[in-house]
Image (tube, helix red, strand yellow):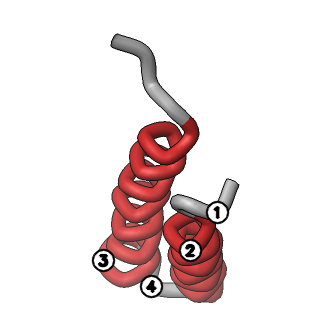
Amino acid sequence: MGMNKNTVLAWATFIMIVVGCSLIALGAFRYDDVAGWGFASVGIGFFAIAWVFNALKGRV
């Protein structure tokens, strides 16, 4: 049982959501200075890329 393209995109979306949540949590709870804003913005960028991966499912 191999993974097709949609399964790979689904796993990539899930992993990017987990990493994005962890980066936002790091920015919110660990770093109180300007670095926290950087971590949170990179986490939001991960959400945007995960959204694109989710939109590509079924089209590739």
Q: Amino acid at mark 4?
A: Asp
Q: Amino acid at mark 2?
A: Ala
Q: Does 3 sit left or right of 41 as displayed?
A: left
Residue position marked by numbered label 1 in the rendering: 59
Label 4 or label 2, whichever comes before in sequence order:
4
Residue position marked by numbered label 3 in the rendering: 29
Look at discs 2 and 3 and give the one toward the viewer.
Answer: 2
| Residue 43 in view of the camera | no
Look at discs 4 and 2 and give the one toward the viewer.
Answer: 2
Of residues 28 and 54, which is closer to you in this image?
54
The residue drawn where x is 69% and y is 54% is 60
Work out how far the residue at label 3 is from the one at label 1, CA to CA, in angstroms: 38 Å
Asked which secondary structure carries label 3, the reply is helix
Horizontal and vertical percent position of residue 59: 64, 63
Asked which secondary structure carries label 2, the reply is helix
Res 22 label: none
Asked which secondary structure carries label 1, the reply is loop
